[in-house]
Image: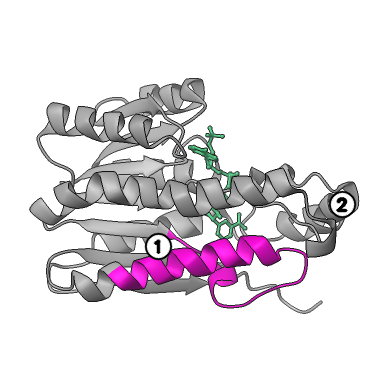
Amino acid sequence: MKIIVITGASSGIGSEAAKALHQAGHTVVLAARREDKVAELAASLGERAVAYGCDVTDYAAVSEVMKSVIARYGRLDVLVNNAGVGYFDKVADGKIEEWHNMIDVNVKGVLNCLHACLPHLITSRGHVVNLASIAAHHVFANSGIYCGTKHAVLAFSEAIRVELAGQLKVTTISPGAVNTPFVDSTTNAEMLNNYKEYFLTALDPVHIAAEIVRAVNAPEGVVISEVIIRPHRPVK
Ligand code: NAP
């Protein structure tokens, strides 16, 4: 059974992935800024679950968590690089602090975790699971900067997949809209109003969690390199 770090495990896809991976018999290390949330989830899971308060934009803090994981378990098998944020807005109306935060969390945060984990993952012949998005493949109006961050995540995934083939498994998960608190970060009231209802009929995060488990549990000689999963909204 594997030792798995999951970032952004306090909510949405990350917390469902933590539950599903734990249910599949793995040891889960839950990280997020809201330490109380991850501690509560780890306590509810019981054995084989531990929680850390950690801001992925802080490389020193990320490194400390990874050091602590190695000291505790002796190895790291999987990184689920999931923490991310998005703000819907038109580029011309964009708020610079929101652009910076998306770059800091979705790009630098993903790189901070990757950099801190990679030596351990190469040693264990492990696995990186990066949460990208349909926004890594298409550019949509009202989420242009977010799309840019997810294009970057897909590029980093492809870089390590190509360079470390045979040493490390790499999976990129690219969901369409998922019904999580993700949309609530949007500060433009009109955009929030427009997107809120759309996200209510989006994918349930348990389906993304199931794909993460499928990728982590793929047989030794198999790597699921990308999963694209979209909501299926029947025509009324
Ligand atoms: P969510 O419910 O809002 O969860 C986001 C998670 O990221 C939270 O656990 C949050 O924890 C964590 N996070 C944010 N900033 C952080 C930071 N600086 N340091 C550490 N953790 C941080 O959203 P979600 O839908 O589950 O999103 C998870 C991932 O899926 C993201 O990468 C997102 O881009 C991607 N995705 C989402 C959708 C969607 O429609 N929902 C679609 C495609 C891809 P704390 O606040 O406790 O730190």
Is the C terminus in the top left, top right, bottom left or bottom right quadrant?
bottom right
The type of residue carrying mark 1 is Glu
Would you call the spot at circle 2 few (<14 residues within 10 Å), some (14-19), or many (20 or more)?
few
- Regarding residue 216, the answer to whether it shows in the image is yes
Q: Which is nearer the eye, 94 or 70?
A: 94
* Of the image marks 2 and 1, the number of the one nearer the N terminus: 2
Please give the label number shown on residue 193: 2
Please provide percent x and percent y for residue 28: 29, 38
Q: In this view, does 161 lie to the left or right of 185?
A: left
In percent of width and height, residue 160 lies at 27, 67
Image quadrant assignment for residue 148? bottom right
Crowdedness near tag 1: few (<14), some (14–19) or many (≥20) residues, C-alpha within 10 Å: some
Residue 103 magenta-highlighted: no
Residue at (22%, 27%) from the top-left corner?
A: 68
Residue type at mark 2: give it. Answer: Asn
Q: Residue tagged by mark 1?
A: 211
Instruction: Give the answer, above or below, for where 106 lies relative to 31.
Output: below
Q: Tag 2, which secondary structure?
A: helix
How far from the left and from the top, in percent, is residue 102?
60, 50
Mark 1 CB lies closer than 8 A to ligand 1:
no
Q: Distance between the residues labelled 2 and 1?
A: 30 Å
* Magenta range: 131-159
